[in-house]
Image (cartoon, rainbow, N blue to C red):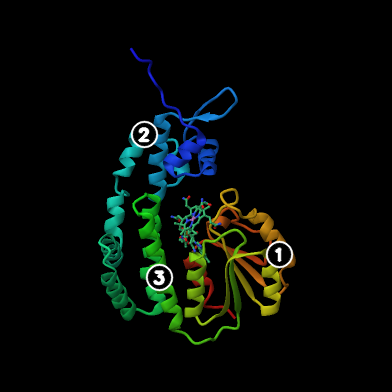
Amino acid sequence: MSPQVTTRFSLREVAELTGLSEFTLRGWEGRYGAVTPLRTETGRRLYRTEDVVRLNLLRDLVALGHRIGDIAPLGELRLRSLLSSPHSEETALTETPKVIRKIFEGGERFAWSEISRTLEKERNQRSGEDFLNSVLLPFLRELNRRIALGRISISLEHIYSSLMKEELARLRAHPHSRKKASSRFLLCTPEGDHHELGLLIAYTALSLRGISSLYLGPHVPKQELCETALRYGASHILLSSTLKHGEGPVEDPLKLVSFLTRHLPQFSQLWVAGRGFQDLTSPDSERVRHLQSFEALMDLLPGMK
Ligand code: B12
């Protein structure tokens, strides 16, 4: 009889199998007790197959909007029933606006001219801001959800991202509002972070509201940012970061904000947003504001002087 082989996985292997980063895996274990892997004599983690199954379930539920702290204590049966409960993917799909479903159905068939027509029709029926809030942002949310669930191939992901960028550029090309605000925004992502979609959305929102802005784009060194803020006379710096410290080559957000509050011109306010700044909920300077969402950004813009 052959000896029984029990498969064990290292932290790196589990990261590859689940698509969760090593940082997230350690966090879910340490903070929420999501799984308790075995340990080698030297203290390295060894995961069982059932740990990987459990982590995949937790990952899918988090992508559907559940909080890890709420679901981490639940057993496998309960997790499975949650996946097929009213918050299941099917329900999320039927709750998705019809136009968004049409875009994704078209994308599956590579029917790009059909998608263009659908978007054009929506664009013509709505104001720029309504198109942004009711079509583009829900489209992005659904796209992120599908990516997190592993439902989108890499090429489709790239095509959808380009589509989003084109639509945003189109909105900016036809501003619906004349320049009226005296504010001057400077937009960028921190050095090391190349994710610029969130920044482009904000740039488009500012343009639709007639607010002057200078788009520096992604990966801007902090010293350069401070210098440009001074030369441009920026009333606001909008800094968006998607990468979390430890998961990419970006500086600790606390240290970055502390540097900026010391070196930005006194007349500039600093607004930070995106998941890279998620943990910076109450910055300790009055000049710094943390924006939780695009809705929060839009709410802040109208009354600006
Ligand atoms: C597109 C993408 C890329 C593209 C970026 C292209 C571009 N020019 O923007 C490319 C291919 C370059 C890329 C590279 C990498 N990526 Co990437 N990427 C993504 C992806 C698929 C979408 C991110 C995005 O743009 N979302 C759009 C924004 C608007 O949505 P959101 O991030 O959910 O933000 C929400 C809020 O935070 C808020 N918000 C966000 N920004 C802003 C801005 C303002 C002003 C406001 C008010 C609100 C706001 O609103 C959003 C909706 O609620 C995500 C996966 C995902 N599903 O999110 C991974 C993801 C962000 N990437 C990730 C990683 C790790 C990388 C790489 C390190 C991968 C690698 N190993 O090479 C590199 C890093 C490159 C670098 N140095 O920056 C991780 C980040 C993990 C973490 N928590 O830090 C993610 C989450 C994937 C994953 N699950 O592992 N990536």
Mark 3 lies on residue: 133
Residue 169, x across and y down, in percent: 44, 76
Depth order, front residue of 304/119: 119
Q: Is residue 173 left or right of residue 115?
A: right
Residue 277, x across and y down, in percent: 58, 57
Q: CA distance from mark 2 to mark 1?
A: 47 Å
Query: Extreme top residue here?
Result: 1
Question: Does the image show residue 126?
Answer: yes
Q: Is residue 112 left or right of residue 51?
A: left
Determine whether the beta carbon of the residue marked 1 sits less than 8 angstroms from the nearest atom of ligand 1.
no
At label 3, the amino acid type is Asn
Determine whether the beta carbon of the residue marked 2 sits less than 8 angstroms from the nearest atom of ligand 1.
no
Mark 2 lies on residue: 76
The N terminus - image quarter: top left
Residue drawn at point x = 54 percent, y = 61 percent: 194
Is residue 29 positioned above or below 211 on the image?
above
Mark 1 lies on residue: 261
Residue drawn at point x = 60 percent, y = 58 percent: 192
Q: Is residue 264 left or right of residue 182?
A: right
